[in-house]
Image (cartoon, rainbow, N blue to C red):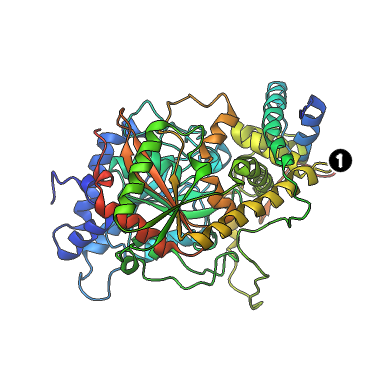
Amino acid sequence: MMKGTNLSSLTGYQLKEKFLSGELTAQGAVEVLFARIDDVEPIVRAYLLLDREGAMRKAQELDARPKKGEGLGLLAGIPIAIKDNMCTGGLKTTCASRILENFIPPYDAHVVERLKEADAIIIGKTNLDEFAMGSSTENSAFKLTRNPWDPKRIPGGSSGGSAAAVSAGTALMALGSDTGGSVRQPAALCGVTGLKPTYGRVSRYGLVAFGSSLDQIGPITRDVKDAALLLQVIAGRDLRDSTSADVPVPDYLKEIEKPVKGLRLGLPREYFMEGLNEEVRRAVEEAVKVYKELGMAIHEISLPHTPYAVAVYYIIATAEASSNLARYDGVRYGYRAANTRNIIEMYSRSRVEGFGREVKRRIMLGTYALSSGYYEAYYLKASKVRNLIRQDFSSAFEAVDFILCPTSPTPAFKLGERLANPLEMYLSDVYTIPANLAGIPAISIPCGFTRDNLPIGLQLMARPFEEAGLLQVARAYERETEWHLRRPEL
Amino acid sequence: MAIIDKKTIEHVALLARLELSEEEKELFASQLGNILNYIEKLKELDTSQVEPMAYATATKNVFREDTPRPPLKLEEALKNAPDKLQDFFKVPKVIE
């Protein structure tokens, strides 16, 4: 038994090493982790569901297996949390919505299958903004998650539960989903690492759909090496998601240790203009100096259509959401309103009672943008400007290999601060949305703290399917700095 | 200025199958108006020569062999049903 061991200072990779060497049993790790959860979960409130029994069962099974040879998976013994919009067969999957409050999926999402095959220990399901719509996790129908660095503040969103759990030491790794920044922004605000892979890199089979041309699943971890390890397990083609790409998956762990000397880094001037918090700006500029010392060539670049990205996103994402969420009709699963007289009333009342306000607002906006007479002015126009944004990136990537900018214009804001004004909340995602629109990979890593001890995130972006290079550049910074080693006091 | 009136909200709510309360109709009319005003900025750009982009990556049709595979079992498919009768999902009257 490992009484007193604190897993908060370990990465998933390190825990796996200890498990394989016999220094730590899987059951010991699960017990220590759940003791930590008992301690701090009442403050952080990252989880919607904890599966102690399932975790312990998996740990027992792992401890009974031989530690040498080919017998164990890449994530053997690592306790992992899953955002509650990915289907877990036999375990409730709610999307933090009343409409799915009692939904038990009959199957596992592709990524959940992969985690199980890789011998990860699934701890539970984490909180999110309802259907992943939000930037603060305050749109959850069930609970408010708090930022482990300051419980009066939001953890970011929509994967706020996953980021808060990894930061608070109640999970060693987590999965999030990113439609407009929902992995990277909460990772930045909680002081952890968050990767949004290229559109098509990871199968979305079993991920509850929000914006289908934007959604992508990604790792939230304590360092870049862990992000590489988790991506290794979930990346690759899956015939059940026809958008998953037939592109070979490299050995990320090997690639990330390569030197970065001579690589070209671009700083897009549009990401350093008004609205950027001064402390965030200074931290990001300090990070640029680190890269300069590592021998990277720094160039100022322009992504001229950046100011239009949020407007494009809130047409395309809501249009796709209004279509995807049409499936919640109270017929086959999910919430159904009581005592309705006919089927139209049943649909309309089940939906209005089951969905929360932000989800309804987005369905209304998306339906409007697609409705007769407005389609050309809104959806078609947005799709064209989206192409201009993608072209900005492809031109930029002719001159530079990677792009560096802040992840979020501000550090974590206070609970309730942006709830009254949806547009202000939407603008929290101004630096993360473009990567989703262009379909390119992007990562957020810790790069400093404000005077109030709030984490600051650095964002790096790369060409499609260049996750290996992206992780390599992120890892190079991590080797030179210690921001990623800081843990909140809870 | 995009003005979203109550009639528009009611029309869109009907399309979206959302039986909104009076309070929500008013709230959404004003909030959607604000958001659409912000989105108006897209009109600054001349996109007459730009192709729309529907997907993030180059895509073509994806085909697979049309071979039967085991489907979801009937009892599994009905497990989450709010109401059922024998092997069917049960719903209120469809035809008056």
Eyeballing the image, is A26 above or below A485? below
**Residue A95, visible in the rendered structure:** no
Amino acid carrying label 1: it is Glu
Crowd class of label 1 (few under 14; some 14 to 19; many from 20; radius 10 Å)? few
- Of residues A432 and A284, which is closer to you in this image? A284
Location of residue A115 (image quadrant): bottom left
Which residue bears the numbered disc 1?
A: B96
Count of labels in the image: 1
| Residue B48 point in image, percent of width and height | 79, 52
| Residue A334 point in image, percent of width and height | 59, 44
Eyeballing the image, is A131 above or below A477? above
Who's the residue at 72% across and 40% down the image? B44
Compared across the picture, whether A378 is left or right of A169 comes to: right
Who's the residue at 25% across and 35% down the image? A39
Location of residue A310 (image quadrant): top right
Location of residue A488 (image quadrant): top left
- Of residues A478 and A224, which is closer to you in this image? A478
| Residue A207 point in image, percent of width and height | 53, 54
Task: Tell me the quarter of the image containing the C terminus of chain A.
Answer: top left
Who's the residue at 56% across and 56% down the image? A393
